[in-house]
Image (cartoon, coloured by chain):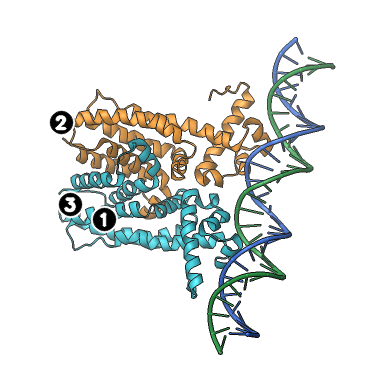
Chain colours: A cyan, B orange, C green, D blue
DNA sequence: AGTTTCCTTGACCCCGAGGTCAAAATTCAA
DNA sequence: TTGAATTTTGACCTCGGGGTCAAGGAAACT
């Protein structure tokens, strides 16, 4: 787990290039579908050179996943029990949608992983994700109990936020195929989702 | 496109076994991740025998995708311009959720495909899906114009229905990891989504 | 029963992909 | 500037996986 951080400038630069290239390729092709040659190509390195920096394909993937989880859960962590309930939840929706817009490859990497049964992140789901969701679900449930939110199942509320926001990253090609040209899916989604959750949650 | 349908009883039986096995494997591993050996194994056939029935891995996948699209779009087709707006949309949500519950492998097969950029179904998205959605979006827009639904972007409404219902099939492992044991995700989702869309759409 | 058609299989081919290695090229330190 | 450490690469190994083929077994028709 504890990796010796790269020390030289070259190591720094090439490790970054590899991870960036790998994110591109893994997120588009899945783990099995990605090849080291593709990643090496995109990173501007030869395959053996790539394997000088990472011991295996698995290791590259693992490093990406590890880095992903933090970023992925931060917006939920930021949901503040002391804030205004509707504003807090709408803020979470907005942050999550921004994540989909700005980091679609990360979203697809995650989706690929979960779709295939989460073989490499099952532990993290149980160990990191669940406690966090339990915590925030309790906050939402308390808001409902205080009458500051319309009655709602907090877990499924959170699921629906994940689903609707990540949809625009994961199913981007379908969204654009249906909308046709001349649309800004994320801007429209922002407006739609704000309406959706405002109506849903108004006490 | 026009395939000579299997004629003998043996062909019937083995083709079905292959498609069923392939659905299982493709939906869980993706196209590149699936192997003919896995499919043959699961179908109870040898690999060459499998290739006696289908000319290639691609062909099996194509047949699955083709069969999928009809089933996948039928619930939307059933949305009736003559019915009660809220009831029609809630009915659509319910049918789509049932599809996720009863055909999760089909849902994941589709998700895998779209995630990877829909290389094999791009044409179908443009040619079949878009016109259908345009049609139904117009119906919903008309309902809104008549004041029978609260104002809503019909396209993003449909996206949100796809996202929230398919989530329970595609991210099943995550949903169960978060909920823990002793839950029926689909039953709970049914209740939650009915509330969500009822509040969203009430005129 | 005999023959034709259909079904099944073991052995094989080839390529792509993950990974190794020793040696060459480059960078760095003194 | 020279020697040590680091980085890069071409050649190579192995194996899994898609696909072929020729020949053996079963059905099916007459």
Locate residue A203, reporting x and y percent: 15, 49
Chain holding disc 2: B
Q: Residue at x 44, y 63 (%)?
A: A66
CA gap, disc 2 to disc 3? 27 Å
Residue D14 against residue B129 in the figure, above or below = below
Quadrant assignment, res D30: top right
Chain holding disc 1: A
Tag 3's secondary structure? loop
Residue designated by label 2: B147
Question: In this view of the protein, can residue B46 be seen by the observer?
Answer: no
CA gap, disc 3 to disc 1? 15 Å
State the mark number for residue A149. Answer: 3
Locate residue A45, reporting x and y percent: 55, 61
Question: In this view of the protein, can residue B7 be seen by the observer?
Answer: yes
Labels 2, 3: front one: 2
Same subunit: marks 2 and 3: no
CA gap, disc 1 to disc 2? 31 Å
Chain holding disc 3: A
Residue designated by label 1: A92
Q: Residue at x 24, y 59 (%)?
A: A139
Locate residue C6, reporting x and y percent: 69, 23
Residue B135 against residue A7 in the figure, above or below = above
């Amino acid at each position: 787990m504890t990796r010796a951080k790269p020390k030289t400038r070259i190591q720094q630069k090439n490790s970054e290039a590899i991870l960036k290239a790998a994110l591109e390729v893994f997120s588009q092709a899945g783990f099995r579908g990605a090849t080291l040659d593709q990643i090496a190509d995109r990173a501007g390195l030869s395959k053996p050179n790539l394997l000088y920096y990472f011991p295996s394909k698995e290791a590259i993937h693992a490093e990406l996943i590890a880095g992903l989880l933090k970023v992925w859960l931060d917006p939920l962590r930021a949901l503040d029990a002391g804030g205004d309930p509707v504003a807090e939840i709408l803020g979470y929706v907005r942050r999550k949608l921004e994540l989909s817009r700005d980091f679609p490859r990360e979203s697809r990497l995650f989706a690929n992983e979960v779709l295939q049964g989460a073989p490499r992140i099952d532990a993290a789901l149980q160990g990191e994700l669940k406690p966090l969701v339990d915590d925030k679900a309790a906050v939402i449930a308390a808001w409902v109990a205080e009458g500051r939110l319309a009655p709602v199942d907090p877990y499924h509320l959170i699921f629906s936020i994940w689903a609707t926001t990540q949809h625009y990253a994961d199913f981007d090609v379908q969204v654009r195929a249906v909308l046709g040209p001349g649309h800004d899916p994320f801007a429209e989604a922002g407006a739609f989702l704000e309406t959706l959750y405002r109506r849903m949650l108004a006490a």
